[in-house]
Image (spheres, rainbow, N blue to C red):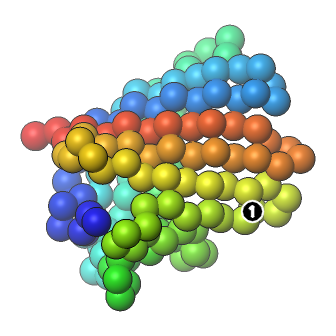
Amino acid sequence: MITLAELAGRWRLSREITDARAGLTGHLDGTCDWLPDGAGLRQVEQGVLHYGTAPPMQAGRVYLWRAVPGGLAVFFEDGRPFHHLCAGRMTDRHWCDPDLYDVTYDLARWPDWTQAWRISGPRKDLHIVNRFQPLG
């Protein structure tokens, strides 16, 4: 199980996207900073996204990470719950009507680690793998 203290800092982020519904692939290269925000950590992603044949574009996301009994809770920037991690269970799911988001964390090669998403439903058929490596 990871802790907020272990996540704090700057990480290299590499994201691979396979969109089976659209028949497109993409990748993002950038950074991810976990910054103290008083209640836990604020995850700030920034990078350049290459998706299909579209011109490269700047992309970014923000999530909030909080320590909770037995693990970590991840929230969207506006405070809505996203997913949880706990000791012994590094998977979770998030229902975003009408699609289902399943996530698996792989920490076996810590401090290099991955977060894999399988998103399925009537609107989406995606596989996204985020790879993180410490910087500095």
Q: Is residue 21 left or right of residue 43?
A: right
- Closer to us: 21 or 28: 21
The residue lying at 66 percent from left, 55 percent from top is: 101
Q: Is residue 110 above or below residue 7?
A: above
The image quarter in which residue 79 lies: bottom right
Q: Is residue 74 left or right of residue 96?
A: left
Q: Residue furthest left?
A: 136
- Closer to us: 62 or 135: 135
Task: Say if residue 103 shows up in the picture.
Answer: yes
Q: Residue furthest top?
A: 53
Q: Is residue 131 above or below residue 16?
A: below
Q: Residue furthest bottom?
A: 69
Residue that badge 1 annotates: 96
Task: Say if residue 64 shows up in the picture.
Answer: no
Q: Where's residue 26, x and y in %?
A: 59, 23
Q: Where's residue 106, x and y in %?
A: 37, 48
The image quarter in which residue 57 lies: top right
- Closer to us: 35 or 109: 109
The residue lying at 10 percent from left, 40 percent from top is: 136
For the N terminus, the image quarter is: bottom left
The residue lying at 24 percent from left, 58 percent from top is: 7
Q: Where's residue 115, x and y in %?
A: 44, 47
